[in-house]
């Protein structure tokens, strides 16, 4: 079944990574994997645009079914292969509600990370303002504090005591923050969560190949370590 699947992905991209983790968790390892280069603009190539008009990664298809939104792809894989591999969404409706809440909250988390990490790439030099940069950093610090609080209440995972789709979707964003220098002393629960999950087999196997050198962009986020 996995041989009918194709994933176009870019190294270090949290949305791409979450699909890779989901495929591992569901024991769908024989899919067609195509790593593309963002630097070479390969995500804008015709082969990608033909199935993803936005020219974005990830781009995923299973047979004739195309799913280009990473959260939707993860939800599809769990639904389609419910009895295979690790269960990522339990049958209890209350537990499902919390998982779905965390999954969709990954969107503002990713957006706020991007607002800080890619500010100078997205905003022309003449339009940059220190006040805007600081607002973005404050908004990200507040967002991360929310996730810190979630883990204090539910731990060790984002939706309770069991690894779930919430972790598949959100962990890549948390790992991305630590890759960019997030202070573990400032966010101890997030650091504990990060250190726990980075040893999970599905995550270790799919760890971004271009993360050998850490960044320090978020080192002094809000409060200095």
Image (cartoon, rainbow, N blue to C red):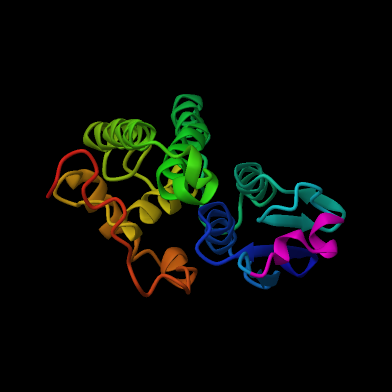
Q: Which residue is at a point 50% across and 63% down the rendered structure image?
A: 12
User: In which quarter of the view is residue 145 placed?
Assistant: top left
Q: Is residue 30 left or right of residue 196?
A: right
Read off the magenta span: 40-50
Q: Is residue 80 left or right of residue 26?
A: right
Q: Which residue is at a point 56% across and 51% down the rendered structure image?
A: 15
Q: Is residue 45 magenta?
A: yes
Q: Is residue 165 visible?
A: no
**Quarter of the N terminus within the rendering:** bottom right
Q: Position of residue 219 (x, y in %)?
A: 23, 53
Q: Position of residue 221 (x, y in %)?
A: 24, 43
Between 166 and 34, the one lying in front of the other is 34
Q: Is residue 154 left or right of residue 30?
A: left
Between 117 and 95, the one lying in front of the other is 117
Q: Is residue 80 magenta?
A: no
Q: Position of residue 110 (x, y in %)?
A: 47, 42
Q: Position of residue 187 (x, y in %)?
A: 20, 44
Q: Is residue 65 visible?
A: yes
Q: Which residue is at a point 51% across and 54% down the rendered structure image?
A: 14
């Amino acid at each position: 079944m996995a041989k009918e699947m194709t994933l176009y992905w870019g190294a270090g991209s949290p949305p791409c990574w979450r699909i890779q983790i989901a495929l591992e968790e569901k024991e769908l390892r024989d899919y067609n994997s195509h790593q593309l280069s963002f630097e070479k603009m390969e995500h804008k190539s015709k082969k990608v645009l033909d199935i993803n008009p936005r020219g974005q990664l990830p781009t995923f298809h299973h047979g004739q079914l195309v799913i280009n939104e990473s959260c939707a792809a993860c939800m599809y894989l769990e639904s389609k292969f419910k009895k295979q591999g690790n269960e990522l969404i339990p049958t209890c409706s209350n537990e499902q509600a919390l998982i779905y809440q965390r999954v969709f909250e990954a969107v503002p988390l990713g957006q706020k990370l991007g607002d800080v990490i890619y500010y100078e790439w997205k905003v022309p030099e003449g339009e940059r303002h220190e006040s805007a940069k600081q607002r973005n950093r404050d908004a990200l610090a507040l967002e991360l504090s929310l996730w810190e609080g979630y883990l204090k209440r539910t731990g060790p995972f984002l939706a309770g005591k069991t690894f779930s789709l919430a972790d598949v979707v959100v962990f890549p964003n948390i790992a991305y923050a630590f890759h960019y220098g997030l202070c573990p002393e400032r966010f101890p629960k997030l650091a504990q969560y990060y250190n726990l999950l980075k040893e999970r087999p599905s995550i270790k196997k799919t760890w971004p190949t271009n993360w050998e050198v850490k960044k320090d962009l978020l080192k002094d986020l809000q409060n200095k370590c």
